[in-house]
């Protein structure tokens, strides 16, 4: 019997984003307070997104910031894997919501980092008899999430499964 490793042939998918700093107020980065923190990013053929640093870093609070986008990346990757696994297991998901939360640690002499990310998805499914399986698929979704596999912060998932 021949055993083959499913990862023997790995596919590589490359992603490119054009990021442009928008904060030059005429003097560049002459001083810490002389420049803005706004930037844009776009991918060819897609809508441009204007973002900024968090307000604690002198950013524009009306715009998304990298810390929020980090949480969205983790939460949405988890959700997309979860929906895939539910479809594979004949679980009909009717609604999915999440409010991801992360703790950014900052301090003198410390490079900032997220020490924890918590996902709290609320999922409405059609069949109450599949609730236990629906809960268990979150572990598998977390294991498969590319983003979660790429970060060092612990990610905890606390799902709530509901039916209409």
Image (cartoon, rainbow, N blue to C red):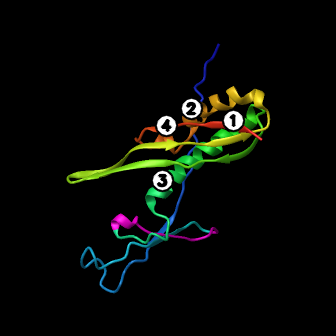
Depth-wise, is mark 2 or mark 1 nearer the camera?
Answer: 1
Per the image, the residue denoted by label 4 is 156
Q: Left of 88 or right of it: where is 136?
A: left
Residue 50 coordinates in the image, percent (x, y): 51, 71
Q: Which mark is residue 17?
A: none
Give the residue number, with chain letter if any, for mark 1: 85
Q: Residue placed at 76% from the left, 34% from the top?
A: 91
Between marks 4 and 3, how big is the CA–CA gap?
15 Å
Choose the circle earlier in sequence order: 2 or 4: 2
Name the residue at the bottom extreme.
Answer: 26
Q: Is residue 136 above or below residue 65?
A: above
Q: Give the labeled residue for mark 2.
A: 7
Which is more toward the observer, 81 or 99? 99
Comparing 1 with 41, the one in front is 41
Quarter of the N terminus within the rendering: top right
Residue lying furthest front: 164
CB-based contact (under 8 Å), mark 2 and mark 4: no
Mark toward the start of the polypeptide (1 vs 4):
1
For the C terminus, the quadrant is top right
Question: Do residues under tags 1 and 4 come within 8 Å of each other at their CB atoms?
Answer: no
Q: Which of marks 3 and 2 is nearer the N terminus?
A: 2
| Position of residue 100 in the picture relative to residue 132 (left or right) | left
Q: Which residues, given as a range, are shown in magenta?
A: 45-57
Left or right: residue 36 versus residue 1 is left
């Amino acid at each position: 019997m021949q055993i083959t490793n499913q990862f023997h042939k790995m596919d590589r998918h490359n992603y490119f984003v054009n990021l442009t700093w928008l904060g030059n107020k005429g003097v560049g980065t002459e001083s810490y307070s002389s420049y803005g923190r706004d930037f844009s990013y776009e991918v060819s053929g897609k809508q441009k997104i204007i973002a900024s640093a968090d307000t604690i870093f002198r950013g524009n609070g009306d715009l998304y910031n990298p810390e929020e986008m980090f949480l969205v990346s983790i939460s949405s990757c988890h959700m997309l894997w979860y929906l895939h696994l539910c479809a594979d297991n004949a679980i009909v998901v009717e609604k999915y919501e999440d409010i991801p939360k992360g703790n950014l640690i900052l301090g003198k002499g410390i490079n900032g980092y997220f020490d924890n990310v918590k996902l709290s998805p609320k999922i409405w499914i059609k069949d109450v008899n599949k609730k236990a399986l629906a809960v268990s698929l979150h572990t598998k979704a977390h294991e498969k999430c590319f983003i979660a596999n790429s970060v060092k912060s612990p990610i905890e998932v606390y799902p709530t499964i509901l039916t209409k």
